Amino acid sequence: MTAGEIRLGADIGGTFTDVALDLRGTLFSTKVLTNYAAPEQAILDGIGVVTKQAGIGFSDLDIVIHGTTLATNSLIERRGAKTALVTTEGFRDVIEMRTENRFDQYDLNLVLPTPLIPRQHRFPIAGRLDAQGRELLALDEVRLEALANELAAEAFEAIAIGFIHSYQNPAHEERARAILAAKLPGIPISISAEVSPQMREFERFNTVCANAYVRPQMQDYLTRLQSRMKEQGAQCPIFMIHSGGGLISVDTAIAFPVRLVESGPAGGAIFAADIAARFDLEKVVSFDMGGTTAKICLIEDFTPQTARTFEVARTYRFCKGSGMPISIPVIEMIEIGAGGGSIAWVDAMERIQTGPESAASEPGPACYGRGGDRPTITDADVVLGKIDPDNFAGGAIKLSKSASETAIEKEVGAALSLTPLEAAFGICEVVDENMANAARVHAVENGKNVSENVMIAFGGRPHFMRRGSVKSWAWINA
């Protein structure tokens, strides 16, 4: 990229889609509600706004960089494709048995995450390699031919292939893919030797299953985005931010969508690292406040912490080992369900709780006037005066304070005999402590003391942390 290029960035979040245009040093930006039925429409709408502001057209764009949480949401909400797992005979239940570690050894009613692919959709195949990649037993190609017919009859939409020791020798996986692809044209097939070529079969198998599970949806979305961009006159390349903070082409993203699981949040961490470098801040904690979730990342020496494995959709809050492991290079961060759209409610013990359920963009918080009638963090902020109803999202979205007060009174105030203002204050106190606690837990898990870090915060809600969590903080209104 060069300084003279006209660059555009687009980030799809759970609630908002943000678009920013860099016209040779002059920045134009907008925020539109995420369209779940057609996510690319929100991007096109946003591009239309910023290009009009800048006085240019789609054809003038030199490069588009795109981050998205669509793959993450698909995994968390289990909205992926009907997927089959083809694996080595005897290893059918690896993704269910996991590593046999108990993340809470004293909980007799421990609930493990449900595997992405149910047992009846896992198919064992004879054939075996040793740890050095030497063939011990030839691949059962006759069985694979028959299996292809079975998968076609049951209308599977995606296939994952994971064989033992394929990271040493991918020959069996590649041969199995060729046999299945010949009889199942158009069905995307992912092999673990390409998706996650490393030892430890549970993590590798789970990663290739996740890749196959979200691949049809992401392929459809990215293909539509490219096509519709060209229809508008754009001829520029589109690059995706991957979970490690770098860029990949759309074709690579279609083949390996699991690499996009932390796509949007990774972009935020890279942004915070750049701010830290500009102001010579060696110890930083970045805080990305979104509409659906909040993301926290530790940054030292101007570099975000990275990892080779991370967890999605933890079943126990802040509990390491209770989630779905994805084995790819990633910027390490913790993500909690505490965003502007997180719904506030009262539990059986008459305590105010927030999240993890979110109103998202459809219907959105009560103050949006789009049919939502449950109180959210955004509604509490409106009642407390932290958000100006007339200038939200640059004035593009007008908010209703009275709708916020009604929702808070109905769901929280009435249950606790509080006025809407008192209930709104309680909601914010609870969510602030939840987020501060998440930052502390993330630091402790990494052997760090978060009080030594400067916080760089960005997103959509500036008043969020209890005092004393960090030594100082700076708010970036992104």
Image: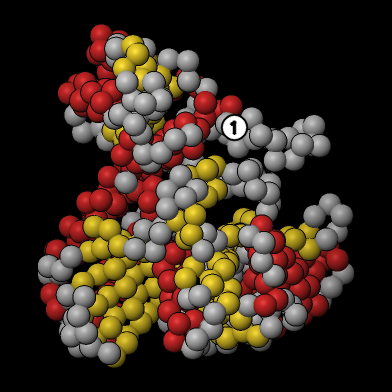
- The answer to which quarter of the image holds residue 98 is top right
Image quadrant assignment for residue 298: bottom right
Residue reaching furthest bottom? 26
Q: Is residue 413 left or right of residue 118?
A: right
Give the vertical position of 199 relative to 358 (above or below).
above
Which amino acid type is marked by label 1?
Thr
Give the residue at x 58% y 77%.
283
- Residue 34 seen: no
Residue with the mark numbered 1: 99
| Drawn side of residue 321 relative to residue 348, left or right | left
- Depth check: give the residue in front, 176 or 229: 176
**Can you say whether 322 is above or below 159 in the image?**
below
Residue 311 in sight here = yes
Residue at figure coordinates x 18%, y 65% from the top left = 237
Name above or below for residue 394 compared with residue 317.
Answer: below
Between 329 and 393, the one nearer to me in the picture = 329
Percent x, y for residue 462? 60, 82
Give the residue at x 18% y 85%: 4
Judging from the image, what secondary structure is the residue with disc 1 in?
loop
Residue 412 position in % (x across, y down) = 77, 65
Q: Position of residue 328 (x, y in %)?
A: 42, 48
Pick whichever, 203 or 265, lies toward us: 203
The N terminus is located in which quarter? Answer: bottom left
Left or right of residue 4, residue 190 in this image: right
